[in-house]
Amino acid sequence: MTSWEQNQNHSSFMRRLESGLNALLMLACLALIGAIAYTHFGPSRSAQSGPVASLKGEKLRIPGVEWSNSQRTLVLALSTHCHFCTASGDFYKRLQPVAAACGVPIVAVLPQPTDEARSYLLNLGVSLPVVKQAPLASVSVSATPTLMVVNSEGVVTDSWTGQLSAELEKEVLSRL
């Protein structure tokens, strides 16, 4: 085999190797993008919108919250890392005066430290007297945001999840 033929074989091998490595790199990038997208938008973190029927009838226990002080309490289960929660900020601002007029206290539950949670809510324009830190699973929540109407015994009577449509926002207001 001449040196020219050896050069051609080596060059051909290098092109195939380079093409294969480029393909592997592209697959790794796609896998990384998919993992990031799932982490931020996957069903266990947040949901677009809709009722969460499975929470109806759940008994909630949040340390420091006394359900019997009111006929109904609205619980907002949120996370500072949830873009649907942030996008729903205007609704939470409109919700506050309606809940106050109906005598329905609002309790916010977030997995982040209370100071961080209060700061997040204030940035949304929402100031709530009761903000609790708790793992969302401890209040049976697997998707954020989740809104729950809880009766005087701590039992969930209605719940919604995700960034709500205008129709579902009206439904929440009507249940207060």
Image (cartoon, rainbow, N blue to C red):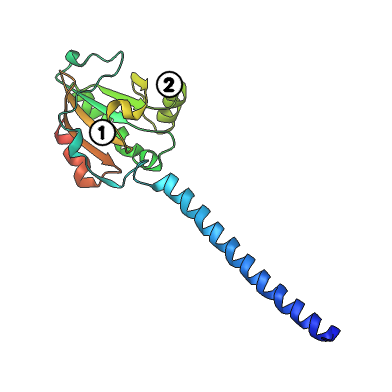
Residue 138 position within the rendered picture, expressed as x and y whole percent measured from the top left: 31, 25
Q: What residue type is labelled 1?
A: Leu
Is 54 on the left-hand or right-hand side of 35? left
Q: Residue 38 carries which label?
A: none
What residue is at 19 percent from the left and 46 percent from the top?
167
Q: Mark 2 points at which residue?
A: 114
Give residue 98's quadrant in the image.
top left
> Callout 1: helix, strand or loop?
strand
- What residue lies at 29% left-to-right and 30% top-to-bottom? 76
User: Are dots 1 and 2 in contact, CB under 8 Å?
Assistant: no
Where residue 60 appears, as percent x and y from the top left, is 23, 23
Q: Which callout, 1 or 2, points at the residue further toward the start of the chain? A: 2
Q: Image point 43% across, 27% down: which residue?
A: 112
Which residue sits furthest right? 3
* Lateral position of residue 75 relative to residue 9, left or right: left
Of residues 149 and 123, the one nearer the viewer is: 149
Q: Nearer the viewer, residue 58 or 124?
A: 58
User: Alpha-carbon distance for marks 1 and 2?
Assistant: 18 Å
